[in-house]
Amino acid sequence: MFVLGVLISIFLLITGNCSRVSWENIYGNLHNRLNEVDGADYKPHIIFILADDQGYRDVGYHGSEIKTPTLDKLASEGVKLENYYVQPICSPSRSQFMTGRYQIHTGLQHSIIRPTQPNCLPLDNVTLPQKLKDAGYSTHMVGKWHLGFYRRECLPTQRGFDTFFGSLLGSGDYYSHYKCESPGNCGYDLHEGEAAAWDQDHGLYSTLMYTQKATDILASHDPRRPLFLYLAYQAVHLPLQVPAHYLDGYHSIANPYRRKYAAMVSCLDEAVRNLTLALRRYGYYDNSVLIYSTDNGGQPVAGGSNWPLRGGKGTYWEGGVRAVGFVHSPLLVKKRRRCRGLVHITDWYPTLVTLAGGSLEEELDLDGYDVWEAISEGRPSPRQDILHNIDPVYVKSRAGSWEAGLGVWDTSVQAALRVGRWKLLTGVPGHGDWVPPQTFSTLPLVGRWQQERVHWDRGKSVWLFDLAADPYERVDLSFHYPRVVKRLLLKLAQYNRTAVPVRYPARDSRSNPQLRGGVWGPWYEEQGEQEKNLLPRYVEDRLKKKQKKDRFRGRSRH
């Protein structure tokens, strides 16, 4: 804008009082001219860092004993997202980030995408990197994909990324990059582009390797052209592996799981530091937006802590879905503050596409909101509710029924919804334990909850919490506010009417990497091969029985 101002001043000096051109025309013409010459400079570089299985408490600024000086500094200088939500497990969070759409609208509402399943992020969804490419961005992904790969068309480089270096599966060895899904079903999972990265593999710990690759991308790219870098770390997902010297600061932690986990988080923090140094070194920083997010809550049995939140990874309690997140950028209008407006991982899609000067067509049918003004300027968030999920396939609550759902919802179905201050859960939300920090002070994991363990399945199938007054979900208010319960159940039913069928196909024996030289990769050879049996027979039968029962109950109510 400084250059634009200088050009305008020169133009005015030349034209003097003889010009009859309006100020608006002068500004507009020169602005368009400048954009033609160097328009890319106005588009910010976007760096999105996704950590895996990092618990809500496992960052210094949330009171952790784990040392995260880099994350603490970046967050304190930017905007901390303190009402930020993701999904409780890996693939769902990643799919919603990539599409800006809820799981019920992509068919991925049940579990994760497993490496032996002929399944992937539906090909008819336009992804975030595709939209950013349309806006003139160079798009690069480093790290964990976990959105399916049974067909070549499912791979990252076919879904909008110019380059890809990383793993296709959800987990694996941090050094050898091998993954065994079952006995005799093992393979290599490090890829560059669409091929195994044998030549790139030097046995380096994946956190360090991915950071070096990201740095190489920054070094080779022209910072005058807009860049989207998606860095999806494997850390701190199981297995608990870390270079030995990172353990040095954590000998005081008695629990071996927590000790290794803490060291992995410190290694991750150092990796983010090295990345931010590279952003400055290669000329990106001043025009960059760096976003840090976790993909779900931590696993206490694997050393993660979500205290004081309830539950953890794989559950719909706050400890499973409330995430560590912040935005760091010189472009923020208001820095060094907390954003308490509601933000969900689907919101990054419209937010980043708009920030990049891209277009959002109505047919994208997004569930996300553009929350940049809420984050950057402190304005109210446009988001007022979050559908955490509706999973019709997950194990049903024996206590659930249409009657418990006040005649509008079958509460045996696993579902969770946030509307304003209220949060509703039905079915089986997952283990609802609070795991305090002292849990990790002793070696045994058995009996570690002491008085904090909750037997959640006591004939219940509906919970209601006022998160504004009770963010730790201690007091169930479902009996006290039946009208609120019914209003939220009706909202669930409304969402459910827009859901597409579940995509959760049976295992395909052709997926075995031993059939392809010991490498995990696509196994559907023909492009035209039909995607049959996306819904396994047992799932299909269960859904048909449920639909039949629902119709019968519906008739009996009238």
Image (cartoon, rainbow, N blue to C red):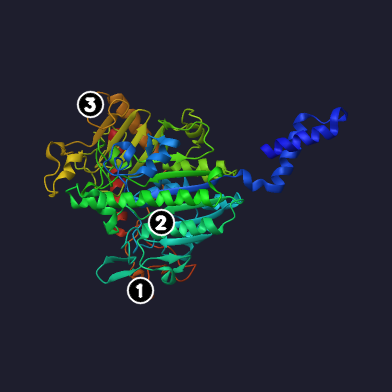
Specify which label sits upstream in the sequence, 3 or 1. 3
CA separation, marks 3 and 1? Answer: 56 Å
Can I make out residue 306 in this image?
yes
Q: Residue at 39%, 65% (x, y): give it.
A: 190
Which numbered tag is attached to residue 147? 2
Q: How far from the left and from the top, in percent, is residue 200?
A: 43, 68
Q: Amino acid at mark 1?
A: Gly
Can I make out residue 155 in this image?
no
Label 3 belongs to which residue?
Answer: 479
Q: Amino acid at mark 3?
A: Phe
Q: Compare residues 522 and 180 and report the one nearer the observer.
A: 180
Label 3 sits on a secondary structure element that is loop
Q: Residues within 10 Å of mark 1 (few under 14, many from 20)?
A: some
Label 2 sits on a secondary structure element that is loop
Q: Compare residues 270 and 8 and report the one nearer the observer.
A: 270
Label 1 sits on a secondary structure element that is loop
Which marked residue is nearer to the observer: mark 2 or mark 3? 2
Q: Is residue 77 above or below residue 105?
A: above
Label 1 belongs to which residue?
Answer: 518
Q: How far from the left and from the top, in percent, is residue 508?
A: 34, 67
